[in-house]
């Protein structure tokens, strides 16, 4: 059984801080690696040890396997938690750690490889009797690929064999443009993943995106930790997630969750992972992919099932057995996660950058905030624009929505434009309120959701000015004149 007392966190931002807190609760020493741009981030400041990484770009530094292995040797770290993104689904990274006797807190390298290739994963799942959408795979016969795809009939979804995050995906409703869309998808796949192989599936109209959390131990036992609804997406990127998924019958919920557990069991899964499905209006569902890591939206499952999934990852990586039987894992209430991005909804969600002049996260009953920012820190264009997650739990879905809207409205982040107000409007949209959101909801409703912008709040503008220039505090006598000119403070 692997034993370790020091864990290196090979990630940054909110997930690095979230992992660090669990490690400290488990009385484990936490090492955080970082690029210079993150030297004053909360995770680095709270770590037991920190090691700076170097590279031509910040992202390149976080992807440098040799530097991370060297950091483990330097600090005595016997295990690595990769978080999500970066190296979390990199089989070469897992093998490099194994070769030096360092425990990878995640699945085995061969599992990462199997499920990281969408074509191999699709074959694996189909051969074991789990549902996959009708499709055509280029590798089966490249010469007839377009012909076989056309024979499936429209609409179609063209997808890259490697990668994820919506890159290279194309929806084709007119077969006359199929070849052109395949060419475009191949070019995008090569650019993003260095792999232009494609496959095509029948596209499910107005699909829902439902995923299932699974846990597997080294002794062959697997359980599911129920499902999450991830249908609220912009350009294939998730924005709001919740659990339980609204509108599922007990039979439908049990069927999709047991299928996920079966897939994880079939591949001998170790650790925490997520099996994702496309869910149709008639209740049919098809395997989409498996993410062999912790998900961004894992907190909603933690709140509803009263589990610490990072703690479970650490335990399972040590070789410990699952302590919960399937019957012991129950859902209590409802939880919603909103991803707060540094972006401007009024200008086509353009990424926003700048210094954080003020940061006051929301609080209150059922409110959890996972964030990796601090007042005085900077938001740059070097990384993904997600800067915080607002997660709210309630006894009912209606209460979770109400708490989420209030929490977003109470969030104060000055100096950088965010999508917080936009998210609050999404939560109050009739389709979402009715539990009828699908993956195309935001595209259909984008204009109405993004166009309504609040008038500038003078109070916030003054607060930002004060925070930007502390000397204004000494000139506070000038504020009443400004106040009078503006017609008085608003209550």
Image: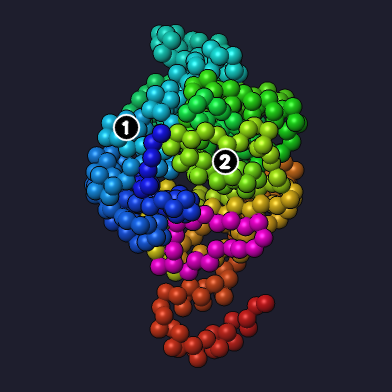
Outermost residue, bottom direction? 477
Q: Locate residue 4: give its quadrant.
A: top left
Q: How crowded is mark 2: few (under 14 residues within 10 Å), some or many (20 or more)?
A: some
Q: Which residue is drawn at 71% across and 39% down?
A: 246
Above-or-below relation of 233 to 385: above
Residue 170 percent across, percent down from the top left: 50, 28
Q: Which residue is drawn at 59% across and 26% down?
A: 261
Disc 2: which residue = 233
Quarter holding the C terminus?
A: bottom right
Q: Locate residue 379: give its quadrant.
A: bottom left
Q: Which of 108 and 28 is in front in this view?
A: 28
Secondary element at image label 2? strand
Residue 414 percent across, percent down from the top left: 49, 67
Residue 290 percent across, percent down from the top left: 51, 29
Above-or-below relation of 29 to 409: above
Residue 296 percent across, percent down from the top left: 51, 44
Q: Give the range drawn in magenta.
A: 358-376
Q: Is residue 437 left or right of residue 24?
A: right
Q: Nearer the viewer, residue 277 or 124?
A: 124
Secondary element at image label 1? helix
Q: Is residue 367 magenta?
A: yes
Above-or-below relation of 210 to 433: above
Q: Which residue is drawn at 49% across and 88% down?
A: 476
Quarter holding the N terminus?
A: top left
Q: From this viewpoint, is residue 306 visible?
A: yes
Mark-to-mark CA distance, 1 and 2: 36 Å
Given this view, does label 1 or label 2 mark the residue nearer the observer? 1
Disc 1: which residue = 98
Q: Residue at x 48, y 54 (%)?
A: 25
Q: Residues within 10 Å of mark 1 (few under 14, many from 20)?
A: some
């Amino acid at each position: 059984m692997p034993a370790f007392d020091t864990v290196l966190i090979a990630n940054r931002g909110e997930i690095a801080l979230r992992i660090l807190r669990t490690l400290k609760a488990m009385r484990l020493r936490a090492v955080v690696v970082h690029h210079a741009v993150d030297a004053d981030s909360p995770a680095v400041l709270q770590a037991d040890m920190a090691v700076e990484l170097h590279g031509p770009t910040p992202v390149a530094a976080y992807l440098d396997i040799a530097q991370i292995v060297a950091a483990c040797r330097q600090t005595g770290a016997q295990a690595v938690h990769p978080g999500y993104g970066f190296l979390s689904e990199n089989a070469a990274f897992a093998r490099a750690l194994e070769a030096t006797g360092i425990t990878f807190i995640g699945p085995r390298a061969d599992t990462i490889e199997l499920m990281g290739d969408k074509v191999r994963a699709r074959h694996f799942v189909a051969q074991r009797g789990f549902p996959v959408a009708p499709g055509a795979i280029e590798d089966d016969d490249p010469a007839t690929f377009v012909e076989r795809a056309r024979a499936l009939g429209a609409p179609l979804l063209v997808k890259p064999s490697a990668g994820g995050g919506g890159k290279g995906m194309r929806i084709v409703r007119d077969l006359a443009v199929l070849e052109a869309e395949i060419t475009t998808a191949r070019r995008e796949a090569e650019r993003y993943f260095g792999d232009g192989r494609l496959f095509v599936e029948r596209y499910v109209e107005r699909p829902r995106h439902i995923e299932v959390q699974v846990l597997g131990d080294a002794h062959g036992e697997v359980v599911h930790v129920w499902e999450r609804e991830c249908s609220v997406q912009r350009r294939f990127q998730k924005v709001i997630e919740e659990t339980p998924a609204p509108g599922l019958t007990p039979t439908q919920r049990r069927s999709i969750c047991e299928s996920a557990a079966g897939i994880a069991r079939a591949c001998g899964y170790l650790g925490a992972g997520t099996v994702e499905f496309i869910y149709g209006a008639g209740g049919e569902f098809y395997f989409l992919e498996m993410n062999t890591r912790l998900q961004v939206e894992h907190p909603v499952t933690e709140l509803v099932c009263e589990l610490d999934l990072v703690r479970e990852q650490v335990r399972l990586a040590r070789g410990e057995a699952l302590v919960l039987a399937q019957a012991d894992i129950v859902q209590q209430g409802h939880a919603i996660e909103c991803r707060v991005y540094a972006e401007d909804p009024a200008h086509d969600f353009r990424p926003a950058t700048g210094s954080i002049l003020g940061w006051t996260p929301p609080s209150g009953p059922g409110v959890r905030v996972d964030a990796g920012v601090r007042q005085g820190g900077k938001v740059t264009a070097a990384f993904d624009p997600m800067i915080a997650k607002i997660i709210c739990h309630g006894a009912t879905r209606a209460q979770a929505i109400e708490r989420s809207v209030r929490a977003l409205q109470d969030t104060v982040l000055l100096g950088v434009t965010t999508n917080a107000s936009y998210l609050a409007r999404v939560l109050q949209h009739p389709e979402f309120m009715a539990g009828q959101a699908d993956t195309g909801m935001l595209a259909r409703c984008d204009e109405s959701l993004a166009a309504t912008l609040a008038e500038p709040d003078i109070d916030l503008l003054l607060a930002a000015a004060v925070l930007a220039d502390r000397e204004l505090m000494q000139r506070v006598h000038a504020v009443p004149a400004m106040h009078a000119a503006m017609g008085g403070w608003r209550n």
